[in-house]
Amino acid sequence: MPILSYLRALNRALFAEMELDPAVCVFGEDIGIAVSNVTTGLLKRFGPERVIDMPISEQAFTSFATGAAMSGARPVVEFQIPALLFLVFEQIANQAHKFSLMTGGQVKVPVTYLMPSSGSRVGWAGQHSDHPYSLFAHVGVKTVVPATPTDAYGLLLSAIRDDDPVIVFGPAGAVAHRENVDFDALAPVPLGVGRVHRPGTDVTVVAIGHLVHDALAVAEELAGTISVEVFDPRTLYPFDWAGLRASLERTGRLVVVDDSNRTCGFGGEVLATAAEEMRLVAAPKRVTRPDGAVLPFARELDLALQPTRGQLRAAVEAVAKDR
Amino acid sequence: MADSAELYRTVRLIRRFEQRAIEMVRAGVIPGGIHPYIGEEAIAAGVCAALRPDDLITSTHRGHGHVLAKGADPVRMLAELAGRQTGLNHGRGGSMHAADVSSGIYGANAIVGASAAIAAGAAWWHRRSGHDRVAVTFFGDGAVNQGVLLEALNLASLRRLPVLFVCENNQFATSMRVQDTTAGTITGRAEAFGIPALTIDGMDAETVLADAARAVDRARAGGGPTFLECLTYRFDAHHTWEYSVRPRYRTEEEVAAGRARDPVVIQAARVPAAVRAEIDDEIEELLDRARRFVDESPEPDPSGALDYLYADGLRGRTGTA
């Protein structure tokens, strides 16, 4: 079977959807030459009226997409740097996201915000290494963090077809990932449906984005002693609570691994909901970035603040032992 | 092109609508208060008279005049201000977010300067779709120091978009005088982006209409954006909270001087008294009806507080389960 890389999957999804729907257009910086490798070939195929290089005016072009979407377009807005999402938080959280409710349902705003290479790329330092998906889930923007190329393809298709704003994070730690896939079998993946990558009976690990791959590696390491189920929510908002509930019915033990700062990070929401509503036979744990982390530049310092396989393994072992 | 009587009808409607709305704020019927447009009516009336029904506008926190002038139903507008289910936005938007998309009103916006880029994007898509619609974005002098507005000027000029930027310079950003907040000139900002800019008398609806019509024609013909700085004066409070807080940032003498030229009086002088009386009566009747409609309209059902949040009807969890 042919090999599909994560970035190529995003590219194929954009191609497919632009072929299918003339309302789909792409805005961003340097997308004509595709510096992120996500928009490769789009300008040549679809032309400068659908693939638009924007000036470095993220706030304006994010709201420009809102206005176009309210008028019938389905824009995809690409950002090269995750911290730019702080700059356009007003335009997404306070404008695009609120228009449907504030107008009493008179408009919809079908914009997709695409952030390939979110999180640390190691060595990109304080202002290029954030992973702010928790913020968007918190305000209620539909938030997607695919871990694999096939999910990246399928979730991006669903995001573009969705009538609400959707933000898609492609974690930097996942974009190097490749899969053997049958291209003809690539299909939309619905928002809000999680995926059990590896079934298990002792501990459920909820892993977000690239950390799914770390969780699978840890599950394999522990295979002889602890049976780990790896649950990938794929969409953080809306979250597949039924899927998590079913997993915890099997295991009763929970660890979350989440590349967010600890306070108000998404992992806290998973733990809280499980504690309130689901079957737990041991105190759950989470592995996250530290409170208030700003990633320092040096490689060892950058890596020191991100969840590691060692930390995850220790958390799984502790939760498994807890009686 | 609108005649003098039509322009009079619009400025008078806005004036009386605002006066009635203020009474309803004082009576507790309109929650949260309003930003009265009194004194600035000629701008909304003149600009919107230059537009077709299928043209678009975006508006501001001080948006009632724009929404009424563009053709929203005053009855449902008043119901929206009072937070009724029958309002334009089913009581979900209120004074600062009133919208009537079917009339080309993409909504009032409560963040200063935020809607210019939205108007630009809408104008771009409609032109791309083969329509010759024009988008007008209204904003105040306080918005000209907001980065996103300046970014929108650049985008609109760069792509020669059919957008009319209408700056309502009422001299104050809340309490701050324009000369204390704004370096250079307001029109200089537009000119720096290659956008033709005019400073005009925003107290005279016919002047506004004439200049807006030229700008709209130019935009519709593919000539790109125009920037109009309309000089005006806010007769009333920044927001009705001033009636209780009573901030002092301008003297009574100054306000009296500012009110000396009244856009409603200026336009009234161009209309025969008998015609005017008829229009006035019609407006009072309309607003009486609007008020009765508000009183007879149901308040929204609290169980629907998150209706319309998502286009697909998605429901998140409640706050307790």
Image (spheres, helix red, strand yellow):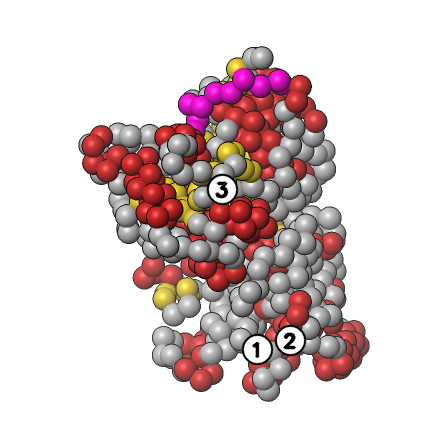
| Mark drawn on residue A288 | none
| SS at circle 1 | loop
Locate the C terminus of chain A and report the quarter of the image it occupies.
bottom left
Q: Is residue A150 found inside the magenta-colored segment of the image?
A: no
In this picture, residue A42 sits left or right of residue B175:
right
Range of residues picked out in magenta: A174-183
**Horizontal and vertical percent for residue A20?**
70, 27
Locate the N terminus of chain A and report the quarter of the image it occupies.
top right
Chain letter, disc 3 residue? A
Dot 3 amino acid type: Thr
Mark 1, residues whose alpha carbon is within 10 Å: few (<14), some, or many (≥20)? Answer: some
Residue linked to disc 3: A201
Dot 2 amino acid type: Ala
In this picture, residue B247 sits left or right of residue A188:
left
Mark 3, residues whose alpha carbon is within 10 Å: few (<14), some, or many (≥20)? Answer: some
Q: Height in image: A315 above or below B277? A: above
Chain letter, disc 2 residue? B
| SS at circle 2 | loop
**In this orientation, does residue A210 appear?**
no
Instruction: Please give the name of the residue rendered at 41% of the width and 32% of the height, measured from the top-left corner.
Output: A223
Determine which quarter of the picture holds residue B92.
bottom right
Residue linked to disc 2: B82
Chain letter, disc 1 residue? B
Q: Height in image: B177 above or below A299? A: below
Instruction: Please give the name of the residue rendered at 28% of the width and 51% of the height, measured from the top-left corner.
Output: A291
Residue that sits furthest to the top in the current view: A1
Q: Height in image: B156 above or below B43? A: above
| SS at circle 3 | loop
Residue linked to disc 1: B31
Q: Label 1 near label 2: C-beta < 8 Å?
A: yes
